[in-house]
Amino acid sequence: MTHKPLGSIITPWGLCLTGTALVGLLACGRDAVPEEPPVCGPSPRQAKVTGYLQCGPTLDFTPVNRYQGEFADAVAREDAVVLIGGSCTGTLIQASSGPVVLTAGHCVGLGDRPLVVFNHEEEPDGPDLVTEGTVIEQSLQPDYALLRLDVVPDVVPIPLTLEPSDRLAIIQHPRGRPKVIAEGRFAGACNQLVYYSDLDTLVGSSGAGVLNRQGHLLGVHTDGDCNENGRGTNRGWTAEVIVEASEYLQDIDLIGR
């Protein structure tokens, strides 16, 4: 595959990605709608979840095996989403050096050996699959970690991407519960972070993949700043900045590069 130099494709993550005029106003413009502060100001650079409330008046989680919405391609890949140590979420990702689990760096420490559980779901199509993994990379800025599994089950890993869509989804284990999906609006990407609104997350959702409509992983959820009134946004670090920081992941592991 021919490699393009960094910054040659939308680079996007340092600038604000634009889709519709509304997204541009909300995410990147100085004249943002007053009731929604712009997301593309100075990066908060915080390494742990900063909010614990749902995003909006209702908690819009759907068990993955009951979901019938617009993210059919994402849900088709849900087998790759795991529960880590009973307290965080992760995703088995596609990598040229071999599949690894990607999660948030504040969930684990370098060298840790957490339990990793596949198929922890309501109405599962099989038993929980439990293995252990070793944390081979861990960082707080960007906030990510990679786990090499002792045993990799017969699961198709999810590819990383640079390509957002107007709506995003997160398949997650909120509070360690069985796997659910939530969806919301892409609100912008800048300062190495991707922002999304009206997309519910809770404690335990940290480390979950932020997925585009194709089910590819655009970022890793790390922080919640939305509230029960629906104001604010949640955010995570982009797959692009994680690949740039990682020794294990390679440039060719990103779709769109």
Image (cartoon, rainbow, N blue to C red):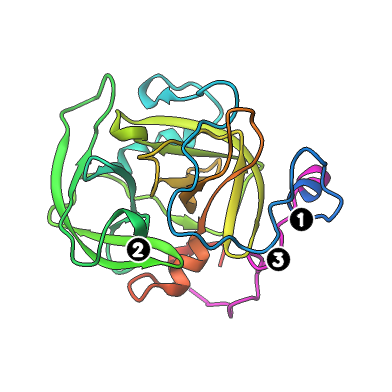
Query: 110 left or right of 210?
Result: left
Q: In this figure, which residue is indicated by the disc labeled 3?
A: 15
Does residue 209 lie above or below 173 as drawn? Answer: below
Does residue 207 lie above or below 147 as drawn? Answer: above
Which of marks 3 and 1 precedes in the sequence? 3
Q: In this figure, which residue is indicated by the disc labeled 1?
A: 28
Q: Which residues are magenta?
A: 1-23
- Name the spot of residue 113 as percent of width and height, x first: 15, 57
53 or 86: nearer the eye?
53
**Identity, as a three-letter code, of the amino acid under mark 2:** Ala
Residue at disc 1, secondary structure:
loop
Which of marks 3 and 2 precedes in the sequence? 3
Does residue 51 lie above or below 68 as drawn? Answer: below
- Is residue 30 visible in the rendered structure shown here? yes
What is the magenta segment's predominant secondary structure?
Answer: loop
Q: Residue at the bottom extreme?
A: 5
Query: 233 left or right of 15?
Result: left
Label 1–label 2 contact, CB within 8 A: no
